[in-house]
Amino acid sequence: MNRETPPTIYLKDYTPPAWWIDTVDLDFVVETGATTVTARLALRRNPAVAAQPLVLDGEDLETLGVSVDGQPATFVATPTSLTLTDLPDACTLTTVVRIDPDKNTRLSGLYRSKDGYFTQCEAQGFRRITWFLDRPDVMSVYTVTLHADKEAFPVLLANGNPVAAGDEADGRHWAKWADPFRKPAYLFAVVAGKLDVLRDSFRTASGREVQLAIYVEPGKLDQCPHAMAALQKSMKWDEERFGLECDLDHYMIVAVGDFNMGAMENKGLNIFNTKYVLARPDVATDVDFENIDRVVAHEYFHNWTGNRVTCRDWFQLSLKEGLTVFRDQEFGADLHNRQTARIREVRGLRAAQFPEDAGPMAHPIRPASFVEINNFYTSTVYEKGAEVIRMIQTLIGRDAFRAGMDEYFRRHDGQAVTCEDFVAAMAAASGFDFTQFMRWYNQPGTPKVVVDGHYDPLERSYTLTCTQSNPRASDDAPALIPIRVALFTEADELIAGSERTLQLTANSQSFVFNDIGDEPVPSLLRDFSAPVNLEFDYTPEQLTLLLAFETDPFNAWEAGQRLASTLILGAAAEIAAGRTPQWPDSFTAACRRLLQTQRERGAAFVAEALTLPGETTLAEQLEIVDPDALHAARNGLRRHLAEQLEGEFSGLYAALTVKEAYAPDSEQAGRRALRNLCLSYLLELDSDALRRLAYAQFREADNMTDQFAALAALANINAAVCVQREEALAEFYDRWKDEALVVDKWLQVQSTSRRPDTLATVKALTQHPAFDAGNPNKIYALIRAFGANLVRFHAADGSGYAFMAERILLLHERNPQVASRLARSFDRWKKFDADRQAHARAALEKIRAHPGLVRDVLEVVERALG
Ligand code: 0A1
Ligand code: ZN
């Protein structure tokens, strides 16, 4: 191929910086068409490193001036570097650059969204603002002055504390901010815009008052109180659980509609995707409310795990992300429902991380190399990273884990460190030897653990033999895997004293339980104590027993998922062979019992237990996937349950129909989830009366959860003509066309529909005024969500692949990060039949051959083809 291969960066090549930048003074003159940035950097040679020239990073900068200690300096510039030689050991470097945020469609660096300017600097966006040593181990104290038109940009924000402000000639004004904390450039942020603000405050445990502010586009203030409450709850929770107090005088959140990711933890000035700030019962669902709690907490928790202690280099990303996800998961579990939180975490892990770890983009939670770091903000680094932290807590216990956190901050506050540093603090606090455990940081792949149980009636002993393997790992050495187990009698009782956490440290290892009167039923990997695939030859009766009686809710749910998976995969094989699947009565009976015991077990749990495993998760269990057969099998089971349990679903739907003032709390949310699950099963039946029931719910709902659930159920109806479906979709858009986040839901409910005409609908929607080809949320809702629609994206004629390739090529220059995320839809193409593979390969090769393809997409596509 006639193109320069982008360089691969390796962890093993890390060297400390040759220069430090102690202070940074930035001056932004924001004008229509261009912003001028003057940077004064106090430079100092790193005495620990042999003398080297200063090589600064930059991208898309127009350099207007470079001087050293006030004198014009000679320099060598390339589009991405500025080199100065023969500098004194300490000096002040001043650069003046012009940037054009209005043309910055990548949403990295300083960019325009609607009428305001916003920044995104992680991972390497700061170099798109000014020449700098753009790496996280260079930490500096920043002062920032912003100048802009006062009428158009009344709000001027930067990290830290406001120092001074004033008016200038020609209707302009300025504001100066100072951040007292040293920070890496990726935590830098500025905002200029016309924004409304919700203010509040928080009194810390030691009695300091922190001023809180949430800035949003005008007219949206009534959608901010939930995020503000979430922030206050997070601040309190971190004090109570980890003894961590807010160190800031001002904590600001700014919501922006154009944002590549979820949110960003810039020091004292978080910038959020509107999706994770704005909520009101009529526009946001229960899931949205809970996600806002989690994301607000996540960014706040980063202030300690990420900002006070940051990463030495980008390979260590999971140091801050895995740990912070673990923290937000724990916060969410405490705030809402611990049982279902864990179930949802694992459902998410299996739907996204396990496939990633089995596909071409598989990498350890600490990758050894990358081409484009933005491609490694992955489910592996985040969610598997959180599982690794959770295992540390499982191995040493909650108290030692807390002591380890204390030790981590005692040792490393103010530093840029590595994953080893974190684990060493945990080791010091607990005395636990983590040598073998480090494999979790260095190896890709989901380990498989095969467990075999043997009962010896003479010895009255039960032996579990666990054998682990991981074909994706670079060698056969075993991982340290904590496996929480308990034994149950066939008469459904937990055997006293049988609850243990086994430490599997060898490739194959046996664990003996003594004084066991009868052959027990083992419950393995309780609470999902390790991110592995665990196999045990359960009988359906044993799984039914665990579903009904296991006291660990995760493993009760897991037993139900195992039962359902076996049935669906068996049925898919039958369908592929041209036969009609049969469904056993025992499964229906188990589901009926679940519905009958919803009061005791909790509506939220029952809703989770009756949600069948997703197609993507099921597909991972197959060598070669026939998406049509899998889809037909899963829907066949849904319809079978609907037919058999219609009375129960209808009865429970009615019983759960209560008039109450909406609150996004876990009790209410659980009831709504179960009621809407009943509705979605009922809509599997070809009944006009039930469609009218759904339509009535759609019309009458006073909250988005119920309205959207009805819409989603209707949108999935396969009948060629369904008036309720058409009307609900039309009315929904008409009512909500001015609420961008609700329009995203409208797009997504159509792109994820199982209807055979979904691709045609998605194509038509790309031309609809609701779609905006430059807005990440719209692209994710319509295009990426279609890529996750297993049966439609993987259409046998390759039309889904061709469409995705076309969208990627339309987008890649405009927004490489988002285009690259779309390219990930192809990850599992080799799991499909030869014809589909041929279509997918053609689409991938077309992308790869495109002249000027951005490196973000190139890395993903090359790995997919490789
Ligand atoms: N650190 C943020 C996520 C984030 C990462 C990259 C971004 O732009 C490329 C933006 C946000 C977090 O974990 O919340
Ligand atoms: Zn994060």
Image: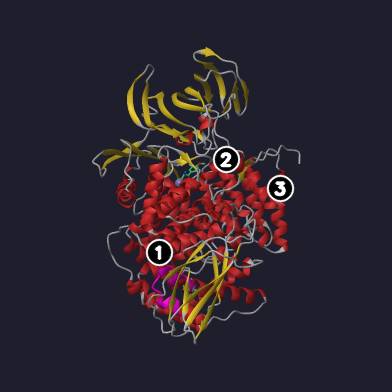
Q: Position of residue 821 (x, y in %)?
A: 57, 48
Q: Name the residue rendered at 48%, 23% in the picture.
A: 41
| Left or right of residue 185, residue 197 in this image | left
Say which quadrant the N terminus sits in. top right
- Closer to us: mark 1 or mark 3? 1
Numbered badge on residue 815: 2
Q: Are marks 2 and 1 in contact (CB under 8 Å)?
A: no
Please check the rendered image and state whether residue 556 is part of the magenta-colored stretch, yes or no. Answer: yes
Q: Which residue is mark 3?
A: 846
Task: Name the secondary structure under disc 3.
Answer: helix
Mark 1 vs ligand 2: CB under 8 Å?
Answer: no
Above or below 733: residue 190 = above
Using the rendered image of the protein, determine whether residue 48 is visible from the camera's viewpoint: yes
Q: Name the residue rendered at 36%, 32% in the picture.
A: 160
Q: Amino acid at mark 1?
A: Thr
| Left or right of residue 715, residue 593 in this image | left
Task: Name the secondary structure under disc 1.
Answer: helix
Please check the rendered image and state whether residue 543 is part of the magenta-colored stretch, yes or no. Answer: no
